[in-house]
Image (tube, rainbow, N blue to C red):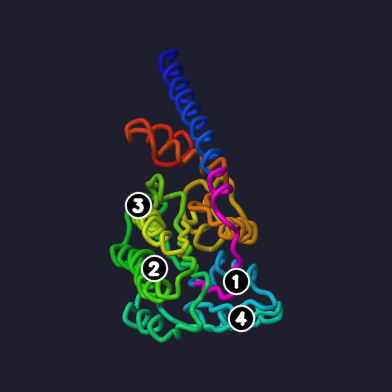
Amino acid sequence: MGFCLAEKNYWVLLFSTLAASGFALTLFFSFCDYRYNRKTVAQHVLITGATGALGSALALGYAGPGRQLTLQGRNSEALDALAKECRTLGAQVCTKVLDLRQIQDLRQWVGDWSAENLPDLIICNAGQNTNIGPQGQGEDFRAMTALVEVNVLATMALIDGFVPALRARGHGQIAIVSSLAGYFGLPMTPTYSATKAALRVYGDALRTWLGQENIKVNVILPGYIASPMCHAMPGPKPFLWQPQRAAQVIQQGLQKNKAHISFPFPLNLGVWALSVLPVSLARPIARLFGYGS
């Protein structure tokens, strides 16, 4: 019994040490972002998945006089209601009802944009989730396939379609909504975690490539945001944020052109620390916090 307690204290101490190291690194890189990145204000903003909790909050956050919004979603009624609300705030709004899994239709939509009306900021926010079920039954393969199509392939298709025009224009900004699950895979959501890891790495690579041509790329790594999708996911949801708070932090981070916009800080730090540990050590620590059996 005493040995087990001592072993547990050892892991807690090790985890705390790594967390403290991560805190120092986070402060350093935050300073670098503040020091070397200029603030920018986008006039034309494109948001995919605009009718979701975070998408709606972002749309309303950006809505205002002199701002043009292009909002994509699948639910036409919800999209029209959101557009109306944004217009009352002074924004010009265009909507597009589109299932992003229809890649050919998505590519056609992107191809129809004129060079004179390209977005200044493209927020790739659309996403889905699936899980193994409350009893750990496993994921449905059709749901897994749809998840990869929406979260990864549609995001890549959208960005790839816009990049040539943005490069020709000589400026632009692309924001990719990943997740803190992209740092450390959650056992309840294996496929979701994998897609978010793919988006994080894809965004980091794009930032290095396109940054040389004045095209900013930012990866957004939120924790738990109150939404039907979040509440449907099994497992603990510490540091749950409301969409409006998350949208405000995202907008501030995009203005500063931060490479990673990750929040909330305690969860961000903990997940980062788990990601740098060997899996054999990280998993027991994750189980202490209710992730996995």
Contact flag, marks 3 and 1 (Cβ < 8 Å): no
Q: Nearer the viewer, residue 116 or 89?
A: 116
In this rendering, is residue 254 above or below 25?
below
Residue at horizontal 34%, vertical 79%? 102
State which quadrant residue 64 falls in. Answer: bottom right
Residue at horizontal 38%, vertical 47%? 185
> In 3D space, how far apart are the residues under numbered discs 1 and 4 (Cα atoms)?
9 Å
Question: Quick check: is 46 in the magenta stretch?
Answer: yes
Q: Is residue 132 visible?
A: no
- Residue 190 is labelled as 3
The residue pinned by badge 1 equals 59
Residue at horizontal 51%, vertical 82%? 117
Residue 1, position in %: x, y?
A: 43, 15
Q: In the rendered structure, which disc, 3 or 1, sits on the residue that comes first in sequence?
A: 1
> In 3D space, how far apart are the residues under numbered discs 3 and 4 (Cα atoms)?
34 Å
Residue at horizontal 36%, vertical 53%? 201
- Residue 83 is labelled as 4
- Residue 155 is labelled as 2
Q: In the rendered structure, which disc, 3 or 4, sits on the residue that comes first in sequence?
A: 4
Residue 108, position in %: x, y?
A: 36, 84
- Dot 4: what SS? helix
Q: Is residue 56 visible?
A: yes
In this picture, which residue range is highlighted in magenta? 30-47
Badge nearest the viewer, 3 or 1? 1
The outermost residue toward the top is 2
Contact flag, marks 1 and 4 (Cβ < 8 Å): no
